Image (cartoon, rainbow, N blue to C red):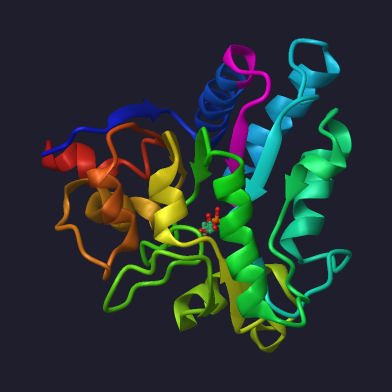
Amino acid sequence: MVTMQIFCEKDYDAMSRRAAQIIAAEIVHAPGCVLGLATGSTPEGAYKYLVDWCKAGLLSFRDVRSVNLDEYKGLAPDHDQSYRYFMQRNLFAHVDIRPENTRVPDGLAADPDRECAEYDAYIQSLGYVDLQLLGIGRNGHIGFNEPGDCFIRETHVVDLAESTIEANSRFFASPDDVPKQAISMGIGAIMGAKRILLAASGADKADAIYKTVCGPITPRCPGSILQLHPNVVLVADEAALSKVNAAS
Ligand code: F6R
């Protein structure tokens, strides 16, 4: 049964604008809110809208706290493919968020297990996330919770799936340069968010979105766990929603 609120937008730009409106509304409603943030192609357009509205004086990130979903293991914050660098380039450097209020897992942590435990403790200390932005992998991953035999509750070090390495190789000189591991927020922190905003664009996400919304709840498609969350809004373009729309 479909219980998610679904916005079907015409194209990537309309999807981005709608996602940005939902994030902006959260900030206006609760200026000190905790945002869970994602990287990748999907949220870039939404971040552009948020930057524009901030520059126009319509929005302020002054009291916002943020936690990111994931980071490649082994990449320094100033590596141009690290997710910390992505966040600086696409959002943080252009809005009035306080740097000390932003957190991305440390891909260079000497003790990654400790970094994971501290990341979860930090999210807990914030009272969990108010609005969690998610993209979705073609294989149904959320954060870097890859398809597997079970859902992993805690922030953890993950071996990236071959399909993820291949999908993300578009950002690197060659697939060999894509890190093979990442640190990812676990399903516990994602599902602990008070509200989840799942964004998707393009026909190559149609299958993952169909399985997430209409399929069985299974760790083989990690996004499907979102069916158990009471407050999920899915913002997607027509191409990403084509299989859901065809079935309903
Ligand atoms: C990124 C993340 C990933 C991406 C997913 C989709 O922080 O956690 O789950 O959201 O891989 O990536 P794009 O948007 O590049 O298609």
Residue 243 place in picture, x, y as percent? 23, 47
Residue furthest to the bottom in view is: 176
Q: Is residue 58 left or right of residue 217?
A: right
How many marks on residues? 0
Residue 8 vertical placement versus 181 (above, below) = above
| Foreground of the two, 152 or 160 | 152
Instruction: Look at 60% across and 18% down and name the residue there.
Output: 30
Quarter holding residue 247: top left
Ligand 1 placement by image quarter: bottom right
Q: Is residue 18 left or right of residue 224?
A: right
Residue 190 vertical placement versus 232 (above, below) = below
Q: Is residue 190 magenta?
A: no
Quadrant where the N terminus sits is top left
Residue 167 vertical placement versus 7 (above, below) = below
Q: Is residue 11 left or right of residue 246?
A: right
Instruction: Look at 81% across and 32% down and name the residue there.
Output: 97
Residue 115 place in picture, x, y as percent? 67, 70
Residue 131 place in picture, x, y as percent? 51, 34
| Foreground of the two, 164 or 100 | 100
Quadrant where the C terminus sits is top left
Quarter holding residue 26: top right
Instruction: Look at 31% across and 50% down and name the residue there.
Output: 209
Q: Is residue 28 magenta?
A: yes
Residue 38 appears in the rendering: no
**Magenta span covers which residues?**
27-41
Residue 64 place in picture, x, y as percent? 71, 29
Residue 98 appears in the rendering: yes
Instruction: Look at 81% across and 57% down and name the residue there.
Output: 85
